[in-house]
Amino acid sequence: MSTFFNLPNELMLNALCSRFPCRDQQIRSLATLISIRSAPCRNIVLHGLEATGKTSITKVVLDELSKKQTNGHVNNNAADDDDIRYAVIKSAECIGGRHLFEQTIGAVATAIDWPESVGRCENLAQLLVQLSKLVEGRSGSSHNGRQQRLAIVFDGIDRQRDAPPTLLPALARLTEIIPNLTTIFIVTSPRPNFLHLPGVPHIEFPTYTKPELIQIISLTTPSPPVPQGTKETKEVWTRYCSAIWDSLSKHSGRDILSFRAVCLRLWPRFIRPILDGQLNPSPFSRLLVANRSLFQNDSVLVPSLVSNAPHSSSLVPQTQQSNLQGIATQLPHISRLLLVASYLASYNPPRTDSTFFMKAALAKRRKKGGGTALSRKPGIGKSRKIARKLLGPQAFVLERMLAIFYAIGEDADSLPGQGKKSKRKELRNLSGSADVLMAVATLVSLRLLIRMGGPNQDVLDAATKYRIAIGWEVARGVARSVGVEVEDYLAD
Amino acid sequence: MSDHEEENSQASYHDTDNQAAYVYHPSNIADEEPTRPMKRRKLGKQKAALDQLQSSTTSKFEALLNGKESVECIQFRYELYERAWFHTEAQIQTILDEANEDTLKDVTAFVQDSMQERSNQTNRETETIPAGFIVTGPNIASQGFLFEQLSGHLRAEVNGPVVALRSGDDSNLKAILKKVIRDATNQKTSLDGDDEFTTGPGGRKLLNYDLEILHGFVRAQGSQAVVVAFQDSEAFDTSLIAELIALVSSWRDRIPFVLLFGIATSLDLFQERLPRIATRSLHGTRFDVEQTSSLVERIFKKVLAGSHAPLRLSTTLVASLVERQQEHAQSVQAFTAALKYAYMCHFFANALSMLTPVLGASPPYALQSEHYEAVRMLPSFKALVKRLIETQDFSRANGLLEDDTILLDEIQSSLSNSPVLHLLRVAHVVASSSPGPVSSIDLYMATFDGTLSESDFASRILESTKRMTPDELDSFLQQICDAIQNGSLDMDLDGWAEEDSNFLEEVTSLQSQVSNLADQASKSGKPVRSSYAIRNQGLRTTVIAQRVQLSYEESTLTEQDKQFTTLVDKLNARLKEYFSVESPKDIFLHEVWLYDSMLPYRDVFTPAPRARIERALFAPYDYLKCDCCESVEGLSSTHPATAILYQMYLETGSLINIFDLWSAFFEMVSGGEEQKIDERDALVLFYRALADLKSLGMIKQSKKKADHLAKTAWKGL
């Protein structure tokens, strides 16, 4: 018989470590904690931030460990008897707890080549029953005394949608009932004792430090290469990446993926002087100086939807401006006015409405009970000092917004080609018209206005509240396009 | 089924007092009710018989001319309408198809590129999902059409399923996934919810929102792309889109997803709403769709300013249509609907519309004597006779008034479409020779107002000719010639060189003279300028002493300059003459092809329900026209109870004490001391009126104070 305790195969580990640099320790610990003859554990928690190699290393280690027996060419006798199977369940792909259970059962059945179809699995209890059935059936089928083990990997289980509250502790306890099972939890940052189980080994995947990052990224070959040769390319690439890290990625987007993305994105522009033949790669500092602006512009860090945007990064403010004006010109006249009215209704407190929007004769302030309306209670005054703009948009009733709409409509520019007089008559004509309300509905479905109170809110209810969803800059642009100056109407 | 049960219950309970609600059965239907299965069989027959009846008589249009119009004429009008609208609609549809064709091509190419890219890097892990952003502009109505076209196009061109999602369909992730899977795999609609299972590969049962199903489908079909299109991305819940993107990006190594987003506002606003993590897993391309305004202009050019247009709209109507486009709904659909309605009204309500010159229609039937009467009532006929009398042509005027055959000749000669054609040709010449871009709608309005020669368009052209050098003038004249010879494709105008040979000859002779001058000038090396241009230049260059400079320049006019100046003057005069066209309103029988009534359009397309309700409650006399009320505004006890209450309601503040309201109401209804009505009866009226107001959404229970109502609607908003 083989020895009772064996460390995992060193050859395999070395190969893995060279594939995943800077993750020696994690690979070794994981392999030890899984393989049957080392120190198999019931539950393992892997934690670390995004893009630290948790998932891929887990997969690869498990893959190697399970391969060993199928290939059978490993000379270690003891390992021949081991039979490790594994199933990976991505929580990101599971909608709801039940889906997770179904996926788990499905994945396990595939992993152990279960011949029959598995039944349904609606809750944790059923999961337990089904799993134990599978595991028992498997050990029953191969009774040649080989040691078996099943590993279930729950990837990103802390982000599971609609998870039942007892999900994690229950999953951790599966191993107490089902023999020869290892559950691996991959999480971002575990709360203390989140499995409600003492003594679960945790393996931390720390974020890469700068030398590690540079070491990893130097394995990537950038395109296009420097014409002087591969050696120069590598040299320039390494120094360039380190410069990028120091200037840009150090502060934002620190993980390897975004760092690599930024490096690859800026690389063609960085070596353009070399490709043009203006500069040589050898004095790197001159290259740096020539591309100074590249390292000062942090707009590349903001991911953008349209891929060709960074080419015109110097023009960013201008395009933004034109886009904002774009909405202003695209919307019909009445919708623009409604948008401005909504902005005012959201940002003005209702008590100031009479001052801003009523005709001068009616705007006299009514004083309650002998003119104490202005005196404030101590304490309130201070909190009122916060600018309304900073408090965010407030909800308003449709009636109020419509009243403001007609009030500012009188001051707005008429359409081109129309006289002042025709416009005033016309806005009055609009009152009570279906067109205005249709415009409001359109704005709501464009999410420029937000209807409060959830999807079940009765739209026809007069008490339905709305809130504006555009900011100050956009509102001002839209208002100017219809000839209204928002500042004139805005309280404080 | 349900009303069957109700019937049974009604039969057993004869005491209708116990019923909470009453179902109204019209007496004739109620008779047939017991023999229901019989009736169904009968109905089929009846319907067929009815159809036959209808197709034979075609009483789709009413008889006009006091009901004396013959059936054939009615039928003919209907056919004319069908033909005219069919023609116009086909034109609009072609334009719409063409307009989106570029976008469709671009998007399809994008999808195919992403497929290519994917197959190239099979081994490398793709980090982002390809996403196309189609910026459609804020006209939501047209998005549906575009996405329909798009999915049809993509289904034909791309190997893989295409799914279009609308925000209204589903509101949670599971439902959306179900829809995606269902549509992609063309399954039948499953009626019930979560418990639905689908058998997956290997006999495994899968939940019906499991993307594993889609994966299996994609593998089985060998699909290279799964296109998921969000028609109105803004209207989706942002978190929903983010979750969906996360899910899709987790599956991207197995299912080749391509996402399309329809964006109505702008890409930046959309990106602001998306969380970063979602943004990061997309890489996109932006597609712009032709804006509605330019599309409307193109359609306008074709179907209203085109030479084959059967019906034209008057300038006032066009102005209000355009204004509505700018103010409210910028949509092609609205424009088309308004146009169709104008067609319908014209052919429905105008007996003379059978004279409308529709392309490809047979000439009208013999006119009835009522038709001649109707023609004689037209303002354009009156104007014609007036003109004849002014030119002392009494016999002809008399004949037109008395003799139907002479009138028929006149009608046939004036329907030959030439006056309109001339208008359109002039408009086209103006449009093609104008120095700047011309809005064809404005040009149409100027032309059909008869004010073209005084309009900006004409004066701008005349001004610009004065400043031109001979070379420029040469090319300008060439432009005019080209316009005349080639016509316009957008407006269906063929070239009319033969018909307008006089003008063309004059232009070409002017052109040859100008080019002669230019040749001479280039030989002598001295530039030729007209006196206008020189004065202009003098004005421009002089800073201090204008007068001196001017006289100096004029004295140096060469012989060639003078020649050129006379040429320019001649051209100007000729063009001015050419541009002065008569207003279509002066053309005899313009009523037949020029539709000019605002009222139907306004009534149908600009409803104001709220204003009407408010007016009905505020001044019920306007609608009731009863004897008891007077037309004066204000409270009156004879008004309906709801109206009385509404008028009181208008005078209250935002919180209404219910008891005060009741006492005021009772006072008004009972007429003070007279006690015309019992208090209990008044209370019933009061309650009913209050319930009416509540159902109109004007009041609701206030939470602030007991026994108070909150006012929720103000008049005139």
Image (cartoon, rainbow, N blue to C red):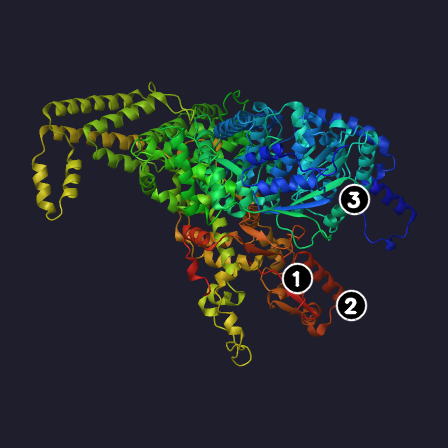
Which numbered mark, 2 or 3, is in the foreground of this view?
3
Q: Nearer the viewer, mark 1 or mark 3?
A: 3
- Residue A135, quarter of the rendered image: top right
Side of B481 relative to A466 (left or right): left
Side (left or right) of A148 relative to B638: right
* Amino acid type at mark 2: Arg
Task: Work out how far the residue at label 1 is from the one at label 2, CA to CA, in angstroms.
Answer: 23 Å
The chain under label 3 reads A
Q: Nearer the viewer, residue A327 or B596?
A: A327
**Which of the two residues, B692 or B101, is positioned nearer the viewer here?**
B101
Q: Residue at x 85, y 32 (%)?
A: B37
Residue located beneath label 2 in the image: B680
Same chain for the residues under marks 1 and 3 in the image = no
Circle 3 residues within 10 Å: few <14, some 14–19, many ≥20: some
- Spot occupied by residue A491 in the image (x, y as percentages of width and height): 46, 65
Q: Which residue is mark 3?
A: A123
Q: Position of residue A295 (x, y in %)?
A: 38, 45
Taking depth in this image into account, of B228 and B602 the one nearest to the observer is: B228
Disc 1 chain ID? B
Element at badge 2?
helix
Secondary structure type for disc 3: loop
Disc 2 sits on a residue from what chain? B
Give the amino acid type for the residue marked by disc 1 in the picture: Ile
Q: CA distance from mark 2 to mark 3?
A: 63 Å
- The amino acid beneath tag 3 is Asn
Q: Which residue is mark 1?
A: B699
